[in-house]
Amino acid sequence: MSFRTKLTLAFLFVSVAGAGLTGAALVYGSYEAQMEQIAEKELLLAQNRAHTLQDDLQLVEAELSRLSALAEVDLADGDLEPEKRVLRYARKDSSLFQMAILLLDASGTCLWAEPSGACALGSGFGGDAWFRRLAAEARPIVQHEESSTSGPQVRVAVPIRRNDRFSGALVGLLSTEREARLRAALDLPLAPSGAVAVLDESGRPLLSLGSEASVRAIAEDRATRAALGGQLGRAWERDPAGRSWLEAYAPVPAAGWAVVIRQARDELDDDLDRELRIFSALLLLGVSLAVVAGWFLARLVTRPLLALRARVQGITRGELGRGPPPPATGGDEFADLARAFHQMDQSLSARDKEIRALASTLEAKVEARTAELRRAQEELLVSNRFAAMGKTAAAIAHELKNALNGLGVAVDLLASGNADAAHAAAIRVQVREEVARLRDISDNLNLFAGEPRLHVTPTDLAALARRSLEVLRPLVEQSGVELRLELGVEPLIVPCDAAKIQSTIVNLCKNALEAMEPQAFGEGLDGPRTERRHTLFVRARRDGPEAILEVLDTGAGIALEVLPRLFEPFFTTKRTGTGLGLAIARRVVEAHGGRLAAEPLERGALFRIALPATGRPAVADPNKTARTRATPPAEVRQAKARGLE
């Protein structure tokens, strides 16, 4: 599919989508507005009919109240002729209602009825709830009832009061089937499924018109309860079949009734069909215009792009600076793009010529520069080697000089023969110590100069720590340091060279013991000393995939300025020593794939060895380990000798 086709389809899609969405939004908005207007119209109709019923009932109440207040209506005189004439003329002269009027005494006995067949004379209503309520409240009452003789009717009763006492009642009876003014409340335009109903205070249909199913739904719906509660409003409801209904309701306060109108939504929106047809025609016209406009715009946009593509393809083939120049002025953004592209083409052509000229000499320059860098690197390596050799030679010379000076003095004293036996024995011990120190220096230099050669076997690190402390036990007892072990009961298996790791542990523990000596706190050999209780902690545990061994002392600690150089070769803070012990220990641990780190504490220092542990613990063979363990280094032998002495 070509770009022009894609662009045409894109324009078409945008145009159609825009027209469709706009049209749909307009139709939806119009539809909702019309439904809102219809709902308001139905609510106004319900409110109007409720007001009409309210006015009619109040008119009946007013007429009966007027009659009850006439002087002729006096039940205390025992003469009913005046009352009969009043009732007869009142019913004859009424042009609004054809209602029956009953005259009741204070006990509820019917004294007279107009017309005469409306009530059996002498019949009593004193036991009825409405009459007791009327006598108690002394105010008009409107009530709907079902009469076995007259059918459904509305009773409007007003009290007759003389001297502030209840002396009887006038009751008007309106037939809901024959009274034209009451049935006028149902004169509404209804859809085929719609209905309107006037409900009494108990929710029973007093008057109804329309679909019987809708009338039953009105009697059972929540809108009825809202209207009977005195509320005015409208609501959209859905029946169990999913059909939407509009219900408008209004109360009739004078009687506690309600007028409810129920209409189906799908029967109220017939006017929208015409709008949908108009919108469909407009949408079809818009789509046609979008197709024409899309094709024209696609052609207008793609023609200069196709020319630009042809030029790009020429540049890809190496044809720089060969394209025809575009017009110098005028045109739109595409013309500006064509001119900018032509300038880029000319610039690329010029730079290509420069690059080709420089490429011929670049290789020679690169080779010369490479040779120069190689010579500088070789000179730097030689310089670094000489610097390291000088530092190493100075450290070795210093140590050898100190040892040889001591040996020379001792030999001179022995050769002179002036030393007594005790002094000579002390000199021989000093000579042996200096010879052992020279041997230590030689051994440490060999270890530091060469790459550690490991004989790896599965070894219990906790057991290895115990063996290391057994080697140092005489030195520990001599120093008076308390030893605490937290090595656990389960084997802590690591693949390692047991001899080299044991030498590392011995070295760390020996350093810890020396850090807790009085000299480490600045006290002299012959001066006063401060009593201190020191403890050497050795702990072993497993931490995930690693085995951890920690050596912790309560000595003088590590100064912060010393910590960064602690593992440097030939760096030491002790009066005697080569400065290679910790450097060799770190090389041994790192050769096992582990880590050795130091951490200063508030009191003392902590050295931590972390070695890779095996996935499943296993007990190592001590005999096999003993066979593969090398001879302990010189410092271990010296520690043994000091302990024995």
Image (cartoon, rainbow, N blue to C red):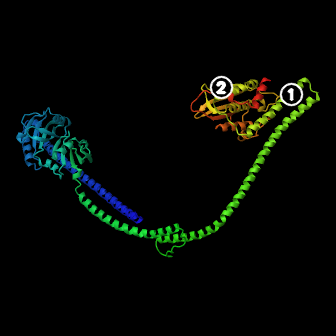
**Quarter-of-image position of residue 215:** top left
Q: Nearer the viewer, residue 389 or 569?
A: 389
- Above or below, comparing residue 463 to residue 360 in the picture: above
**Quarter-of-image position of residue 87:** top left
Left or right position of 123 against 285: left
Q: Is residue 481 visible?
A: no
The residue drawn where x is 72% and y is 24% is 473
Say what amino acid the circle numbered 1 marks: Arg
Image coordinates for residue 128, horizontal then vertical, percent: 15, 33
Say what amino acid the circle numbered 2 marks: Pro
Say which element carries label 1.
Answer: helix
Say which element carries label 2.
Answer: helix
* Residue at mark 1: 428
Q: Quadrant of the C terminus?
A: top right
Q: Is residue 440 visible?
A: yes
The residue drawn where x is 74% and y is 36% is 581
- Above or below, comparing residue 13 to residue 222 in the picture: below
* Residue at mark 2: 622
Mark earlier in primary sequence (1, 2)? 1
- Spatial CA distance of label 1 from label 2 is 38 Å
- Above or below, comparing residue 368 to residue 483 in the picture: below
Image coordinates for residue 217, horizontal then vertical, percent: 21, 43
Circle 2 residues within 10 Å: few <14, some 14–19, many ≥20: few
Q: Nearer the viewer, residue 206 or 71?
A: 206
Image coordinates for residue 357, horizontal then vertical, percent: 63, 69
Q: Nearer the viewer, residue 1 or 184?
A: 1
Left or right position of 420 against 609: right
The residue drawn where x is 27% and y is 47% is 236
The residue drawn where x is 84% and y is 36% is 402
